[in-house]
Image (spheres, grey):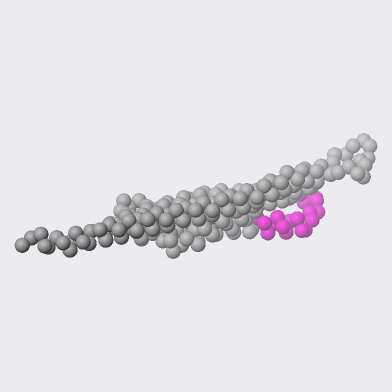
Amino acid sequence: MSLSEHSLQALSWRKLYLSRAKLKATSRTSALLSGFAMVAMVEVQLERDYVYPSGLLIVFSVCTTILVAVHLFALMISTCILPNLEAVSNVHNLNSVKESPHERMHRHIELAWAFSTVIGTFLFLVEVVLLCWVKFLPLKKQEQVTPPKEEDINAGVAAAGASTLIMVPCAIIFIVFAVHFYRSLVSHKTDRQFQELEELSNITRLQSQLDRAEAPNMQSAPGLFP
C-alpha cells in the first residue's frame, strides 16, 4: 500500500469515528429532551377555574409538538445509521471502512446533528418559558384585608415574566455561541482539509520522484548480467 492510499484510509477512518460520535450524542440528547418535553406536556396541570389565553395554549402545544417531532426525527436518523457504523468500526480491517455508509449519508448525519443540538435545544429553551407561563399565570393573589391596588401585578404574571427575562438573554447567548461554535468548527475542518491536501500532494510528489529515481536503475539492471 502506498503512502497516499494509507493517508486516504486514515482520513476515512477519522471521518467514520467522527460520524459515529455525532450520532451517539444525537441519540442521547434527542431521547432525553423529547422525553422531558412529553413529561412536561402530560404533567402540566391546567386550572379549570382560570380562562387561559388561547394563543398561549396554542403556542405551547405547537412548540411541544415541533420539539418532540424534531428530536424524534434526529433520533430516527441516528438509530438507522449508527448500527451500520458500529458494525464497521468493530472490524479490525483497514479496508472495511469502504463498507461504511458514513460518506454517502454524510448529509443525513449532519442534519440529525443540527436538529438535535441547534434546533431542538433552542425549542427546549422556548418550551421552558412557555411552561412557566402556563404554570404560573393562573396564580391569584390571596385576599387581603385591604383591597389590592390596581397597579399591583399578579404573582403568576410576575413569575412567568421573570422566567422570560432570564431566558431571553440565555437564548441570545445560545444563538451567538452556536453560530461562533459552528463557524469555528467549519474553519477548523477547512484548515485541516487544506493541510491534508498539502500532505497528500507532498506524498504524491515524493513518490513520483522515487519512481523516476528507480526507473534508470531498473533499466540498467539487465546489463549487469551477461
Residue occupying the point 58% across, 53% down? 183
Q: Is residue 101 magenta?
A: no
Across and down, in percent, residue 147 comes to: 93, 40
Figure label count: 0
- Please state which of residues 198 and 15 is positioned toward the viewer in this rendering: 198
Residue at horizontal 64%, vertical 58%? 65
- Residue 143 placement (x, y as % from top left): 88, 39
Please tell me whether residue 50 belongs to the stretch shown in magenta.
yes
Q: Which residue sits furthest top?
A: 145
Q: Is residue 80 left or right of residue 39?
A: left
Residues 85 and 138: in front is 85
- The quarter holding residue 145 reads top right
Which quadrant: the N terminus? Answer: bottom left
Q: Position of residue 124 (x, y in %)?
A: 64, 51
The stretch of residues the image draws in magenta is: 41-64
**Any part of residue 137 in sight:** yes
Q: Is residue 112 above or below residue 136?
A: below
Q: Residue drawn at (46%, 56%), measured in percent from left and top?
A: 194
Quarter holding the C terminus is bottom left
Q: Determine the residue positioned at 65% across, 50% down.
A: 176
Most foreground residue, 6 or 17: 6
Report whether residue 9 is seen. Answer: no
Q: Is residue 132 left or right of residue 7?
A: right
Q: Position of residue 49 (x, y in %)?
A: 80, 50
Q: Answer with left or right where residue 131 lies relative to residue 140.
A: left
Extreme residue in the left direction: 226
Position of residue 160 in the picture relative to residue 177 (left or right):
right
Nearest the camera: 53 or 111? 111
Where residue 83 sits, quadrant-wise, is bottom left
